[in-house]
Amino acid sequence: MVKMKYLIIALLIVMVGILATLLFFPSEEKKVKKRFAHLSEHMSKDLGENTFIMANKIKRISALFGENCNFTVSDYSLSGNYTREEISGIALRGRAHFSTLGLKFYDLKVSFPEKDLAQVNLTARLTGKSVYGEHVDETRELICLLKKIEKKWLFSSFEVIEVLKR
Amino acid sequence: MEPTYRSRGINFCWRLRYLFSKPKRHDVVVVRFAGTKVMLLKRVVGLEGERVEFRDGKLFVNGSPLEEPYVRHPCNWNLSPRIVDNNCVYVVGDNRSMPIENHYFGQASLGRIIGGLLW
């Protein structure tokens, strides 16, 4: 009976250990997915967002990117290589066009083609209302690259897949 | 794809439709637009190697106007000629009432065509 008690306690300790490991030491895939959750959270904008919140979100968006990030978007003139500071400016101007904004990511498939490099195929959906009252609802498939720099996964490339090429 | 198919309606896709054959002109196909859930219904108007263009809202394939009885809304679209690449088809929606820049159309690779429409 005593042996049984110790066995149950040992099993409980092992289970708690496994849970703690999963919780406090997430896999690299989870860490990469978390970056997208943060980008989604910081890009979103509620009606009447104040300047303090806006500045804080822009700062946090900037921290998600590497020193340089490459954008490939065929329909828009946005394509090019941008520094972290330029990305902050783009995010600031982009968000200013909207009174409400939501950016959600779906179907994330993470792979690691090289050490400290993650490739993510995903669907991005941008919804919102412009300051002129126009409703926006755009969905695109993306390929993103993230590099692990100083133990942090940072965005280094965004490519919008051109499914219908005019 | 209005008026042929209602916008945001429910349709069924026959995924085996193009298992042994390629899409033909005027077929309505399901194009995988993003991820595994976002699909578009489009009509095949141009096949690989063909020259496609719009002149004053009329679609021309290899220089000849294409008969399109399914198009009910007239448009004034203009698009310079372009050749459809290998392993691709050129797809356009039936509803052309909007400005050309607001319509999703163009060349889609055959890999993106996931099937035909049952109804």
Image (spheres, coloured by chain):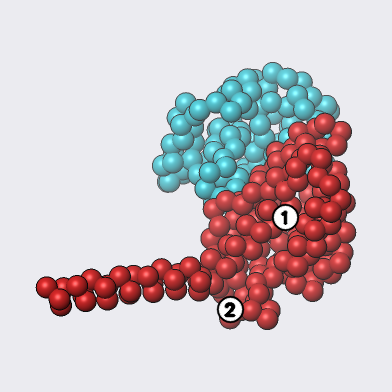
Chain colours: A red, B cyan
Judge whether A125 appears above or below B68 on screen. below
Chain to which mark 1 belongs: A
Q: Is residue A79 visible?
A: no
Residue that appears at 80% across and 52% down? A53
In contact (CB < 8 Å): disc 1 and disc 2: no
- SS for callout 2: strand
Residue that appears at 71% across and 61% down? A158
Identified by mark 1, the residue type is: His
- SS for callout 1: helix
Q: Nearer the viewer, residue A78 or B19?
A: A78
Judge whether B85 appears above or below A32 on screen. above
Q: Nearer the viewer, residue A98 or B13?
A: A98
Location of residue A84 by image quarter: bottom right
Judge whether A93 appears above or below B52 on screen. below
Question: Relative to residue A45, is residue A11 drawn left or right?
Answer: left
Tag 2 or tag 1, which sits nearer the N-term? Answer: 1
Question: Relative to residue B102, is residue B19 drawn left or right?
Answer: left
Q: Is residue A95 visible?
A: yes
- x, y percent for residue A5: 19, 72
- x, y percent for residue B52: 73, 40
Which disc is residue A114 wearing?
2
For disc 1, the marked residue is A42
Q: Nearer the viewer, residue A65 or B59?
A: A65
Residue that appears at 72% across and 66% down? A64
Location of residue B104 by image quarter: top right
Binning the other alpha carbons within 10 Å of mark 2 as few (below 14), some (14 to 19) or many (20 upward) gives few
- x, y percent for residue A55: 84, 57
Identified by mark 2, the residue type is: Glu
Judge whether A89 appears above or below B105 on screen. below
> Looking at the image, is mark 1 or mark 2 nearer the viewer?
1
